[in-house]
Image: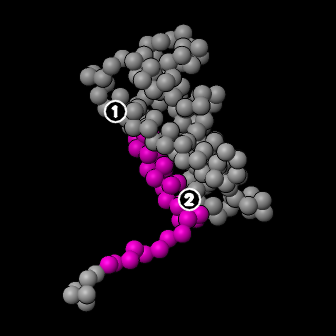
Amino acid sequence: MSHDDGWQFLVLGRNIERIDMTTRLLRGRVAYLDASPDWMAFLRASGAMEAFMRSTHQLDDANGVATFLMLDRMFPRSILFALNVIDEALMEIQSAGQRDSHGDTARQMVAHARTELEFIDMTTLLEQLPELLQTLESTCYRITDAVTHKYFRHEEAILWVSEGEL
C-alpha cells in the first residue's frame, strides 16, 4: 500500500487502538492485583515479555513492568511510543502548508498526554496508574473524535418514515 494519507490513517488508528488496549489491560491488571495472574503472564499476554526481559533483570518489579509498558521509547507497544507515532501520522496527514500544530486539536491532545507521561514520577507510577489510565482512555476517545470531526464529512441521518406516518 502506498504510504499516502490512507496509510497514515491506518497507522493512526492502529496506534490509538494500541494505546486503548494497553490501558484497558493495565487497568484490569491493577484493579484485580490479588486475583489476576503474575506480571510475567501479563507481559506474555500483551506481547511484551521478550522485550521486557531484554531491558531488565528485575522480573518481579510491578512498577518496572508498568513503566516499560507505558514509557519505553523503544518498545513499539508502549503508550509513549504509540503517542509519538500518532503525532507523526497526524503531521503527515496535514497538508505541507499546515505543518504547524496550532489549532490542531488532536495533536494538542497527543502533546498533552505525551508531556504528562514524560514528566511522571516513575518511582510511584503504580500508585498513579488507575487515574492515569482513565485519562489516557479518555484521551484516545477525544483524539478519535477530533480526527473524525476534522477529516471526515458529517451529515445528519435521514429519517425514513412511511407515507402513513406523514
Q: Which residues are magenta?
A: 131-160
Where does the image place residue 94, in percent across and percent down from the top left? 70, 59
Q: CA distance from mark 2 to mark 1?
A: 28 Å
Q: Nearer the viewer, residue 151 or 65?
A: 151
- Say if the magenta span includes residue 34: no
Q: Give the structural element (helix, strand or loop) at label 2.
A: helix
- Please identify the quadrant where the N terminus is shown: top right
Where does the image place residue 136, in percent across and percent down from the top left? 47, 44
The amino acid type, in three-letter code, at marker 2 is: Val
Q: Nearer the viewer, residue 81 or 15?
A: 15
* Residue under the image location 50 percent in, 71 percent down: 154
The amino acid type, in three-letter code, at marker 1 is: Gly
Q: Is residue 123 left or right of residue 24?
A: right
Residue under label 1, please give it: 28
Mark positioned earlier in the residue sequence (2 or 1): 1
Residue under label 2, please give it: 147
How many C-alpha atoms fall within 10 Å of the one at disc 2: few (<14), some, or many (≥20)? some
Q: Nearer the viewer, residue 146 or 135?
A: 146
Asked if the residue under mark 1 is in contact with the one under mark 2, i.e. CB atoms within 8 Å, the reply is no
Residue 50 position (above or below residue 124): above
Quarter holding residue 119: top right
